[in-house]
Amino acid sequence: MKSTLDTTLIHGGLTTDSKTGAVNTPIYQTSTYAQSALGEHKGYEYSRTKNPTRDGIESLIAEIEGAKYGFAFASGMAAIGTVLSLLKSGDKILISDNVYGGTFRIIDKVFSNFNISYAIVDMRDSTLLESSITSDVKALLLETPANPLMSVTSLEKVAKIAKSKNILSIVDNTFMTPYLQNPLSFGIDIVVHSATKYLGGHSDLVAGLVALNNDELAQKIGFLQNSIGGVLAPFDSFLLIRGIKTLGLRMQRHCENAMEIASFLSTHKAVKKVYYPGLKTDIGYEIQNSQARGGGGMMSFELESGYDYRIFFKSTKLITLAESLGGVESLLCHPASMTHASIPKEIREKVGISDNLIRLSVGIEYAKDLINDLAQAIEKSKA
Ligand SMILES: *Cc1c(COP(=O)(O)O)cnc(C)c1O
């Protein structure tokens, strides 16, 4: 898995300051910049529009996603909201099954007020996807692997369909990160990230990123970023650059640990099903293997009846029950009541998010310690 990307994570972007030679991107904690005469400045006028520390992270995400342009936002949702603002009244967007709850919410509850409609489509089914693209559909948005059932969709197929129908394709690449998967290389138009997760990597900041190649689209997104103003602050830009330096090491360990835990869970008598695309037995394995450089650190599993998930969640000692994912520490989550609570119960059950489903963000601790913790919590949850 090691590649030149490991080097780019450390040396990419604008890591040196030409004025001082500082090895790390300095934090330019300023809102404004002196102008020497009317209309004369050094390229920076106001920090919502442009800030040198934000320039650092924006050029870095572009470089590691294989993109021409990068944009940094105050959160993943600010990034997604800004990208969706490309749509106009009367437009329709297709979203894949099981998109992040907040993404569903902003489309269902906010953009619907601006007469932008949506439909949920299982994009693994190319025929269904193609027939769902009516003349009002202007964009599609998907996650792969998708939260929380880790269902895998072919990026190449989706990109091809979107291109043939002349609509915009958007991929939320949060779960894979640019270290494991680069959607633009398959012909996807726009990549979005919640950098709060693996890219930041330490559960100590909230941030969002966008990467793309198209000049005209990038100009529109730059305009929207400045107009809406949900930009990433200088200090958080610095923290994110710092986090990304170790992304390669962390993702390698996340993948190794997840593989060990998935193997352990899949042979456990209390576990009904494991959803992890790194397992050869997983339904999405073939496609995952063809488009990503690993299974990632996210998995879900379903307890057999006879085991009480509420007791399980109370019984882990090392692994914390919390929202979010992608940090160095392992976290557990109950999708039905946490990340996917904003999705109506009927839709939730239809797509397979049962109350017995447990999502695990596998951290970079010693795998055996994690396995022991899961084993004792499962044992305690036996009714
Ligand atoms: C967390 C998350 C988001 C939202 O990002 P925030 O940084 O919390 O605003 C979007 N997509 C996915 C897949 C996420 O996990």
Image: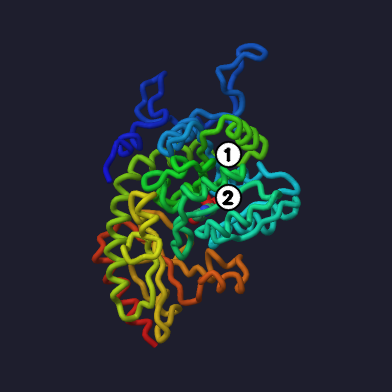
Considering depth in this image, is 122 or 2 the residue closer to the camera? 122
User: Eyeballing the image, is 308 above or below 326?
Assistant: below
User: Eyeballing the image, is 380 above or below 319?
Assistant: below
Residue 77: mark in rendering: 2
Corner quadrant of residue 288: bottom left
Q: Is residue 292 left or right of residue 47?
A: left
Considering depth in this image, is 40 or 276 the residue closer to the camera? 276
User: Eyeballing the image, is 190 above or below 285?
Assistant: above
> Can residue 363 be seen in this snapshot?
yes
Q: Residue at x 60, y 70 (%)?
A: 347
Q: Nearer the viewer, mark 1 or mark 2?
A: 2
Considering depth in this image, is 170 or 248 the residue closer to the camera? 170
Could you tell me the amino acid type at mark 2?
Met
Residue farthest to the top, as pictured:
37
Position of the C terminus, as image quadrant, is: bottom left
Residue 81: mark in rendering: none
Q: x, y (%) of residue 326?
A: 41, 54
- What is the basis of the colouring in this image? rainbow
Q: Is residue 380 left or right of residue 232?
A: left
Q: x, y (%) of residue 346?
A: 61, 74
Residue assigned mark 1? 231
